[in-house]
Image (cartoon, rainbow, N blue to C red):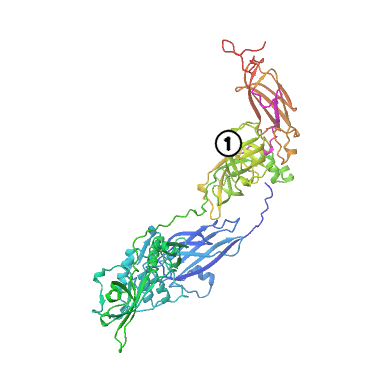
């Protein structure tokens, strides 16, 4: 329908993009997101080319296109070769980018909007990229969240930072106490304490290592006994009675300072901020000291950022650790003689000073001052030990009541095809175009109901026979509802239920119930009552059962502009389009419709009466049938109700009136007028049909009504009940 001239409404944009991600090689690429939408997910563990086919990621060609093309994954292996496609694009001398994890995309990056959207990648680097062989590989990877998260053992992160000669501190193996790191790695592995952290060059390696140490609760130092870099976790993994004891008889010289780090403003709630590596979203875990809250009479909250924690369970355990630190922690500065020389940072020991009111307590060593030649005393700054990491979680992550929007494309909730009537053709074509149509020309339209809130619209694809489906139009979702109760042919105020998108309904436009076209005169979405003008265009009013669907289709239907001919059977699929994808054609239902010259057929007669009655139940005597004209050429796109006065007729129109008893024809008359007289022969049930004819074509629909006929009028009581004989037959008036 309409002009076939091609119009350019926008452009697709194709880029060649070389993206440097970080040091390589890496273990695995698992996800690619563009514009915060998933373009690809899977598993790539070696250099290779993958295909991305998300042409509707941003809404397709009607919106901002999508991502379609090949992505070369270059892990950065030592023997990685120069990528030919990249060399062709850059020209000249191009490196192989060994030791770097890079990606090269060549293809469509969008449509309409020429500006590319940001790309994000989720990848894993645990076993690969070491300076030499992977240290302690069996405990390097810690899987969390049922295997969805592959975190790295923090002890391995620290070893890599200490030993890597390219970006780390470059320490040789003989300067590291691997036994301490192995013990820490075993403990962290058993605790399920893995981290997902990204180091960038704007941060020093020392600062990055301190971030790791803060996460896990540990100290890293050069041992005075061995001269080696040592790692010690701060855990409550000791037996108090087996710890070194210092009193005034066994090395304790004095307690120079004894303070309590508590007060009215000490936080009684800790909020740990962490990042979910799967969704790349910041989340929180919260722990409270209920006794402290009751004592203070209010909640005093503090936030601590641990971005490397990947799960709520782990963040909650760290929050419990941090809430302990916020309690009234006693700080001591004790002086020991040389018997305390073996103490190192993070070590746990006991002191006993009854004269100072201290029977026996456990302290955790912090800073240690080894003394001088003139003063050999060792000064230890220590805290009352409360820093162990809890192994249990007593709070659960509260599930959010918010559900993320479902961007997946789903088949239309309800869908149907209809042959385009002449009135709809008038709205889409010019008079010159309509005059050029052949009498057997036929057109198709489709109606679909929105399956989900993020379903934008749908593409109408059609075919004939075994040909491939081709896109014909883009349709909007049709507002719809169901009839709450059965309606007769003369009902105009109708209750509806189960409405979808009813806020988009406009009055004065066409709707469809079954095969009957109606005009919407009013819609009250609060009472769910719609007022209709019945039997418009080329249809007649009929009875509809409860549950029949009403389609408010006029501004939403998709139209196939293909000019078909009478008898063609057209198959169609409605391909849903969301903001993120297009429905796979295999998931769409195949609809079918045989076309029948609807646009060329004369309109049926209207206001049909029998003996001056509309839809009578019982009749007697001679049957006088009358009606009024309808004219598709004069009516054009005006919705004229069945009960309105006559219009026309269209030149050449005649009418055929038929009287049937069951399937048997009793009488048939053809006339160009608006009346006909019929005479039944015996009592019984009869059907009258009235249709229009022009140029060998019958009207699309015909008036049809069934009633009971009596030769003479039955006798009735004053209450209106039919009187019967003793044999059960109706009594009639002689």
Q: Is residue 180 left or right of residue 638?
A: left
In this figure, which residue is indicated by the disc labeled 1? Answer: 484
Q: Residue at x 28, y 76 (%)?
A: 355
The answer to which image quadrant residue 275 occupies is bottom left
For the C terminus, the quadrant is top right
Residue 657 inside the magenta-drawn segment:
no
Q: Is residue 554 left or right of residue 125?
A: right
Q: Is residue 698 left or right of residue 297?
A: right
Q: Nearer the viewer, residue 659 or 360?
A: 360
Q: Is residue 132 left or right of residue 274?
A: left
Provide the major secondary structure of the magenta segment. loop
Q: Nearer the viewer, residue 106 or 495?
A: 495
Q: Is residue 417 visible?
A: yes
Tag 1's secondary structure?
Answer: loop
Spot occupied by residue 315 in the image (x, y as percentages of width and height): 40, 63
Crowdedness near tag 1: few (<14), some (14–19) or many (≥20) residues, C-alpha within 10 Å: some
- Image height of 708 relative to 240, above or below: above
Q: Residue at x 71, y 30 (%)?
A: 607
Spot occupied by residue 407 in the image (x, y as percentages of width and height): 52, 53
Q: Nearer the viewer, residue 488 or 604?
A: 488
Q: Nearer the viewer, residue 337 or 77?
A: 337
Q: Is residue 597 visible?
A: no
Spot occupied by residue 133 in the image (x, y as percentages of width and height): 34, 72
Q: Residue furthest bottom?
A: 374
Q: Magenta region: which residues?
A: 595-617
- Image height of 7 relative to 222, above or below: above
The answer to which image quadrant residue 614 occupies is top right
Spot occupied by residue 295 in the image (x, y as percentages of width and height): 41, 63
């Amino acid at each position: 329908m309409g002009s076939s001239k091609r119009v350019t409404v926008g452009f697709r944009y194709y880029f060649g993009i070389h993206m440097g991600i970080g040091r390589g090689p890496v273990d695995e690429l698992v996800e690619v997101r563009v514009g915060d939408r998933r373009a690809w997910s899977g598993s790539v563990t070696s250099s290779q080319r993958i295909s991305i086919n998300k042409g509707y990621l941003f809404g397709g060609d009607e919106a901002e296109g999508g991502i379609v093309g090949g992505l070369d994954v270059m892990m950065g292996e030592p023997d990685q070769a120069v990528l030919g496609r990249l060399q062709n694009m850059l020209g000249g001398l191009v490196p192989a980018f060994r030791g770097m994890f890079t990606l090269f995309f060549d293809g469509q990056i969008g449509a309409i909007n020429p500006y590319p959207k940001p790309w994000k990648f989720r990848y894993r680097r645990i076993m690969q990229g070491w300076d030499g062989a992977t240290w302690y590989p069996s405990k390097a990877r810690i899987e969390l969240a049922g295997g969805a998260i592959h975190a790295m053992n923090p002890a391995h992160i620290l070893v890599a930072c200490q030993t890597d000669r390219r970006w780390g501190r470059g320490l040789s193996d003989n300067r590291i106490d691997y036994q301490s790191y192995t013990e820490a790695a075993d403990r962290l592995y058993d605790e399920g304490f893995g981290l997902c952290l990204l180091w960038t060059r704007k941060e020093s390696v020392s600062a990055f290592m301190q971030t790791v140490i803060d996460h896990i609760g540990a100290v890293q130092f050069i041992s005075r006994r061995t001269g080696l870099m040592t790692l010690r976790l701060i855990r409550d993994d000791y037996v108090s009675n087996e710890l070194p004891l210092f009193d005034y008889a066994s090395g304790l010289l004095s307690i120079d300072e004894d303070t309590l780090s508590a007060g009215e403003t000490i936080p009684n709630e800790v909020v740990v901020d962490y990042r979910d590596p799967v969704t790349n979203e910041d989340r929180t875990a919260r722990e409270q000291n209920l006794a402290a809250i009751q004592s203070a009479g209010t909640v005093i909250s503090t936030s601590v950022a641990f971005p490397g924690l990947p799960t709520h369970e782990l963040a909650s355990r760290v929050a419990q650790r941090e809430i302990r630190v916020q309690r009234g922690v006693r700080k001591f500065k004790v002086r020991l003689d040389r018997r305390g020389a073996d103490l190192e940072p993070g070590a746990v020991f006991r002191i006993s000073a009854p004269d100072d009111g201290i029977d026996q307590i456990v302290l955790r060593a912090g800073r240690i001052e080894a003394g001088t030649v003139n003063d050999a005393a060792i000064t230890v700054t220590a805290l009352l030990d409360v820093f162990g990491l809890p192994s249990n979680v007593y709070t659960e992550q509260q599930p959010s009541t918010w559900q993320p929007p479902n961007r997946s494309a789903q088949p239309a909730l309800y869908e149907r095809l209809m042959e385009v009537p002449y009135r709809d053709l008038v709205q889409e074509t010019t008079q010159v175009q309509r005059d050029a149509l052949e009498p057997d020309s036929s057109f198709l339209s489709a109606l679909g109901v929105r399956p989900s809130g993020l379903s934008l619209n749908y593409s109408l694809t059609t075919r004939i026979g075994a040909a491939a489906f081709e896109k014909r139009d883009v349709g909007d979702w049709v507002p719809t509802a169901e009839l709450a109760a059965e309606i007769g042919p003369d009902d105009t105020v109708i209750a509806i239920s189960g409405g979808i998108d009813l806020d988009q309904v406009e009055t004065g436009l066409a709707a469809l119930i079954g095969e009957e076209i109606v005009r919407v005169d009013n819609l009250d979405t609060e009472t769910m009552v719609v007022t209709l003008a019945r039997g418009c265009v080329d249809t007649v009013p009929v009875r509809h059962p409860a549950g029949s669907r009403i389609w408010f289709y006029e501004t939403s239907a998709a139209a196939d502009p293909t000019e078909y001919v009478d008898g063609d059977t057209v198959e169609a699929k409605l391909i849903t389009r969301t903001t993120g994808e297009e429905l796979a054609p295999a998931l769409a239902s195949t609809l079918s419709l045989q076309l029948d010259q609807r646009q060329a057929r004369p309109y049926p007669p209207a206001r049909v009466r029998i003996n001056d009655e509309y839809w009578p139940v019982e009749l007697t005597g001679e049957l006088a049938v009358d009606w009024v004209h309808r004219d598709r050429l004069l009516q054009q796109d005006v919705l004229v109700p069945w009960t309105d006065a006559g219009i026309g007729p269209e030149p050449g129109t005649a009418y055929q009136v038929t009287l049937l008893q069951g399937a048997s024809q009793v009488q048939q008359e053809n006339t160009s007028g608006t009346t006909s007289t019929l005479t039944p022969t015996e009592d019984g049930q009869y059907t009258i049909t009235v249709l229009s004819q022009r140029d060998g074509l019958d009207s699309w629909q015909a008036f049809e009504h069934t009633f009971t006929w009596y030769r003479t009028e039955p006798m009735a009581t004053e209450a209106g009940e039919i009187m019967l004989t003793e044999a059960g037959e109706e009594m009639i008036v002689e």
